[in-house]
Image (tube, rainbow, N blue to C red):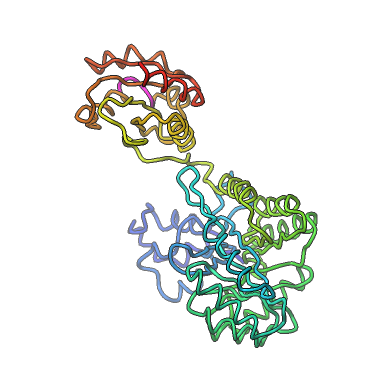
Amino acid sequence: MALTGVEIFKLLPKTNCKKCGHPTCLAFAMKLAQRQVSLDACPDVSEETKKILGEASAPPMRPITIGLGDKAVKMGEETVLFRHEKRFVNPCAFAVEIKDSLSDDDINKIVDDVLNSEIDRVGQKLRIDAIFVNNVSNDAGRFESAVKTITSKAPLVPLIVATGNPAAAEAALKIAADKKPLLYGVDESNAEAMANVAKTYKASLGVSAKGLDALAALTEKIKSLGVEDMVINSGAKTAKEILEANTYIRRAAIKKNFKALGYPVITFAQRDDALFESLIAALGITKYSSLIVLSSIEKWKNLALFTLRQNIYTDPQVPMQVEQKIYKIGEPSSNAPLMITTNFSLTYFIVSGEVENSKVASRLAVMDCEGLSVLTAWAAGKFTASKIAQFIKESGIENEIKHKELIIPGYVAILSGAIEDKLPGWKVTVGPREANGLTVFLKSYAHN
């Protein structure tokens, strides 16, 4: 059971040294009880206290990582039921199923689709995160061959090895052991043998059982066998069952600190109908799945699911932002138009997209307004004539262009006169209110 702030305080040095960044040990203890800081922040805590407080400082859902490097998938570590309470930590991962019964050519085609799935949306790289290779053939040799084909073609893509056969699992993990894979297929009948394989090859385990009571008992058993890194599957299949099970698991972990269910959840969304599959996957995204397995990865499906995931897993308290600077769109000459906007990511990418569509090479000055949109930043006093003028002067743009004309968003046309007063010699032109008017505006501007 989690300790209270006062109980934690009794175990701390009580020196009030402020080395942890908090004014008193009591303040630090309260933050630790709320899981808002790490025990490592206290340099003077004893080893004995670390053991006692380790449970209190750990997140209620165990963090799990599969894969290596930049493409590694991190799951778990969640601390809240609802994103407005704080934020969700690790975005759910998407994995596509590859059956080992497929031909090598078909396997290679799906792997190519995974490698080509990455898109750039509002400054983030989004992609299919992992491959779920499934031993449907029940043949250890064929399974080993399929894993070898996948890992040779996509060595950096995290791998989930799915089989209930310990011999097939070992054959596959011999190939993929250095890639930190997830071994899925553990149930009550094979728990001990699969745990031994996982320990040998340092793999995480995917555990399934029918019902939450059986699942909790199984995770405790596997933990006693020496494996702590797990993802769990309650056996839920329908949308109703998935919603109920995922919610019960998250509430048990977060509200009750029930460690036997404090693991990332894997959801199998595969359906014959692609749209139905997308809806099940969307349910998993919004309701607590950490790993979602898909049967296919059409581009339209990817875009819909990537967009939903991105929206759910942004921090609601911190607007998405891009860097403040002058962006070149195309290859602008010294006479190319110069526009200005705020650094809200969505604003930047919509505006830059419309400028690209116009085929008019331009410069876009993006000003740091703490990630606020144009009207919001203006209303908050962050997109003002004085600040715009200061930004333009300090940017050094005058050394790159022959003209002194700045195009401002139509919604802040009221600033035009004040900006000209703050930027002597400059002309301020009022652009369209909406970004979708930029194409016509810029073509007309270039023509003139």
Q: Magenta residues: mostly which secondary structure?
A: loop
Q: Which residues are magenta?
A: 382-386
**Location of residue 223 (image quadrant):** bottom right
Is 295 located above or below residue 323 in the figure? below
| Image quadrant where one finds the C terminus | top left
* Residue 83 visible in image: no
Name the one closer to the observer, 365 or 445. 445
The question of residue 10 being in magenta is answered with: no
Residue 176 left/right relative to 253? left
How many numbered marks appear?
0
Is 68 located above or below residue 88 in the figure? below
**Location of residue 363 (image quadrant):** top left
Is 154 located above or below residue 273 in the figure? below
**Location of residue 358 (image quadrant):** top left
The question of residue 384 being in magenta is answered with: yes
Name the one closer to the observer, 422 or 161. 161
Residue 65 left/right relative to 446? right
* Residue 344 visible in image: yes
Please name the residue shown 50% across and 69% down the image.
Answer: 154
Please name the residue shown 47% across and 58% down the image.
Answer: 29
Q: Position of residue 316 (x, y in %)?
A: 54, 42
Name the one closer to the observer, 434 or 211. 434
Residue furthest left in the image: 399
| Image quadrant where one finds the N terminus | bottom right
Q: Position of residue 146 (x, y in %)?
A: 61, 77
Residue 317 left/right relative to 171? left
Q: Position of residue 313 (x, y in %)?
A: 56, 49
Name the one closer to the observer, 373 or 426. 426
Q: Position of residue 238 (x, y in %)?
A: 80, 58
